[in-house]
Amino acid sequence: MKDTKYNIHATNINGLGAINVANEILTSLLPLNNIQKIFYSNRIKNAENNNNYFLYKRILPNPLSRLIEILFSRLFFENIPTLVLGDIPLRGIYNQVLYIHQANLVKPPINKFSGNNLKFKLLRLLFNFNLKYVKTIIVQTDYMRENLIKSYPKLKCPIKVIPLPPINIEESNIENTIKGPIKLIYPAGYYKHKNHDFLFELSEVYKTLKFEIWVTLKKEDFRKYNRLPYVKNLGIISHSKVIEKYKISNGLVNFSNLESFCLPLVEAIYLNLPILTVKRDYSEWMCEESAYYFEDAKSFKKSLTQLNEDLKNGGLKSLEKPKKKFKFSWDEIGGKINSYFQL
C-alpha cells in the first residue's frame, strides 16, 4: 500500500446540503496527512489561515468559468491523484476519485425526473467525455449506482456506495405529541426537482384534514405559496435551527422527485421522526417500509390520516431497520475515501 499524496478539488460546492457534506468529508480527511492541496471557491469552513487550502478565484461568469476549468484543467491544477467533490471529472488529471451527488447526471430515459434542459445535457456530456480520467466513483445509494451504470454502459471504473450519516445529530426519540393541526417540516431549497408546487395540490385535502407544513424558502421564492393557509415559511435557517424545528414538529414531509441521496431523510431516521414522503426510488431505498408514502394528493391524504392516527395511538412505524444502513461515522467515511487512493 502506497502512502499516496493527493489534491482535493472543491471549487463547485454550492447547495447547502452539498456544502455541509463537503465540510464533513474535508474535516475527516485532513488528519490523515495525505492531502497536498485543497482547491475551493466559497463557503468551505476552516479554509482561512490553513496552508492546505487554496482559493480558486473566478473572474468569468460561473458557467463559463466552470467549463474552462473542466476542459483545460491542466492549466490550473497539477496532474496528481485528485478527489473531485464537484460531480464532473477534470480533463487531463489522471487517477481521480469522483464524488457524485448530482442526481441529474442520470439520463432522462433512466429516470424521467432527471433534468432535460441544456445545462444538464451539457453536464452529462462533459461527465461522459472525461470519464476516462476517473479511477473510482463514489455515490451514496445503490439506487444511484445502478442508474449511473444504466445511463453510461461504457463506464468501466468501479462505483463505490458510501451512505452518509447525519451531520451533528445523535440518535434520539422525539417526544411526539399533537397540539392542534399536525405539523410537518420540509427543509429544502427552491429547485425544480424539490417539487414545492405539489403544495398547491393539497388545498382539497386541507378542507377535510387540517395540517401545517413548514418550508425553508427565500421570501421571493415563497411569494407564490403565500396564499396557502397550511404553509408557513421559516425562511433560510441554519442547519442547527432546522434540527430545533425537527424536535417541535410531528414529522418530516418530502416532496422531492429526484435525489442522489436525501440528507433530511437520514436526519429524521436518526431522530425517530415520522417520515411522510413521495414514493420514489431513492426514498424507498433509504426508508424501506418505515415511511408513510404518497404519490398524489389522494394518497397524501390517506398517508397523512394514517400518520395522524399513529401519532395519537402510539403506533408509529419503526425506523430502526433503515437506520442500520447509515451507521457510519464521518471518520470512517474519510478513511474509506482515503483508501481508494492507496490501492
Image (cartoon, rainbow, N blue to C red):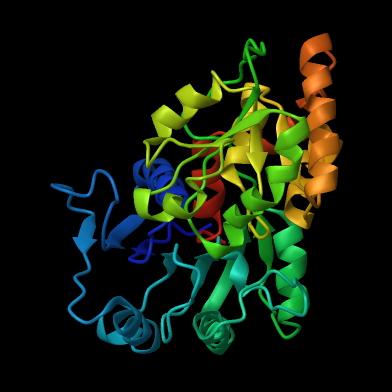
Is residue 302 shown to the viewer in this render?
yes
- The front one of 64 and 245 is 245
Q: Is residue 67 above or below residue 56?
A: below
Could you tell me how many numbered marks the image carries?
Answer: 0
Location of residue 197 by image quarter: bottom right
Q: Which residue of the protein is positioned furthest toward the left in this rendering?
A: 49
Q: Which residue is found at the position 70% from the left and 72% from the top?
A: 148
Is residue 77 shown to the viewer in this render?
no
- The C terminus - image quarter: bottom right
From the top left corner, tell me how far across and down residue 273 is, in percent: 66, 25
Q: Is residue 36 above or below residue 89?
A: above
**140 left or right, relative to 231:** right
Q: Is residue 185 above or below residue 198?
A: above
**115 left or right, relative to 12:** right
Q: Which residue is found at the position 68% from the left and 44% from the top?
A: 203
Q: Which residue is found at the position 19% from the left and 70% from the top?
A: 57
From the top left corner, tell me how far across and down residue 112 is, in percent: 74, 72
From the top left corner, tell me how far across and down residue 171 is, in percent: 61, 20
Q: Which residue is found at the position 52% from the left and 81% from the top?
A: 123
From the top left corner, tell me how far across and down residue 228 is, in percent: 56, 43
- The front one of 174 and 65 is 174
